[in-house]
Image (cartoon, helix red, strand yellow):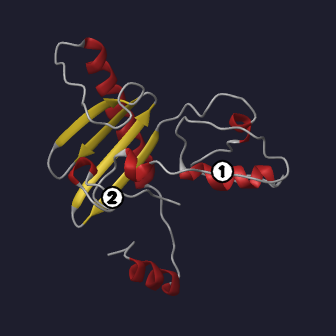
Amino acid sequence: ADHGEAFAGEHFRMGHGASLYDEVMRVPLVLWGPGVPTARHQEPVSTVDIVPTLLDLAKLEVPKVSGGSLVPYLAGGAPPARPIYAHSNYYGIELEAIVQWPYKMVVNRSAGSSAIYDLSTDPGELNALRDPDNAQLRRTARRLQRQMREIRRRRAGDVVELSPELERQLRALGYIQ
């Protein structure tokens, strides 16, 4: 899967387009086959890591892409240290999220609001951290904002060429408006 679903009105939402909370973003990644280590991991990774991981498992060359192979992590190494970024523009509601474990920042650019959660103590993202006197929290917020700006800057140069047929299919699915 590439997204989860809010079924019970989590964060006052239903469905999957207008939210970047974990009920929508967290989906299981299951790998099975020859050479795949048997293990279960809880730390978040990104869908951009799937193609490099599959190519690495197949012993094929991994091209330079946004993600990286998870094979070292699956074999007992540390999870990727880079932040996980998500963006959504759902009917004009522009949302961004960034996870740098254990913190997650969710930004509603349309409303001009943001919230930071500590996923290690609040996995349901129910209690945003709000302490204006906490210097550590202010540093964390600045670091997450800086990482988000850097990712947006890098993505701004990404250009994807679509064939007319692929563009038609993506429009029909609602991925392009």
Image height check: is 33 above or below 84? below
Residue denoted by label 1 = 64
Disc sitting over residue 31 in the figure: none
Residue that appears at 63% across and 53% down: 50
Image height check: is 76 above or below 161? above
Asked whether 99 or 161 is in front, the reply is 99
**The image quarter in which residue 135 lies:** top left
Q: Give the residue type that dot 2 points to.
A: Phe
In the structure shown, which secondary structural element does the residue marked by tag 2 occupy? loop
Image height check: is 105 above or below 66? above
Q: Give the residue type that dot 1 points to.
A: Lys
Residue denoted by label 2 = 7
The mark closer to the camera, 1 or 2, is 2
Q: Earlier in the sequence, mark 1 or mark 2?
A: 2
Left or right: residue 48 versus residue 126 is right
Q: The C terminus appears in which quarter of the rendering?
A: bottom left
